[in-house]
Amino acid sequence: MTELETKFQQKLDFVKNWTGGGKKVTNDEKLTCYGLFKQATVGDVNTSRPGMLNFVDKAKWDAWKKREGMSKEAAMEEYIKEVDAQHAKYGD
């Protein structure tokens, strides 16, 4: 595992256990992290867009699609920066 992958995994673990400040994160901020997470772990979107009435999954798909073409490494770096920014903004 590279140093970047280790840092990325540490941020994933942090987010899973983030209480307090983590509950204050907006839906848009969560979607930003989701899109970066999917791009870092899967790569470009590989599924069709969910239907019109499936609002949650459609928003997630759109957030992921915005990252299309971004390398996995760049997505990991951006994810780390985004989680750090949210942590600084909302605290523990």
Image: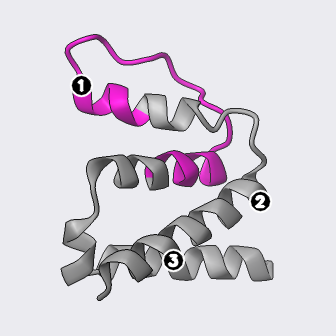
Task: State which region is magenta.
Answer: 34-60
Q: Select label 1 or label 3 by which is in front.
A: 3
Amino acid at circle 1: Phe
In the displayed structure, 7 sits above or below 80; it is below
Q: Select label 3 or label 2 by which is in front.
A: 3
- The Cα atoms of the two marked residues, 1 and 3, are separated by 28 Å
Please report whichever mark, 2 or 1, sits nearer to the chain's N-terminal start: 1
Q: Residues within 10 Å of mark 1 (few under 14, many from 20)?
A: few
Q: Which mark is residue 55?
A: 1
The residue identified by callout 2 is 73
Q: Residues within 10 Å of mark 3 (few under 14, many from 20)?
A: few
Task: Please provide percent x and percent y for residue 11.
Answer: 51, 77
Is 46 situated left or right of 21 in this image? right
Pick the front one: 41 or 29? 29
- The Cα atoms of the two marked residues, 2 and 1, are separated by 29 Å
Going 47% across and 36% down the picture, which residue do you hit? 63
The residue identified by callout 3 is 84
- The Cα atoms of the two marked residues, 3 and 2, are separated by 17 Å
Residue 72, magenta (yes or no):
no
Amino acid at circle 2: Glu
Task: Please provide percent x and percent y for residue 28.
Answer: 35, 47
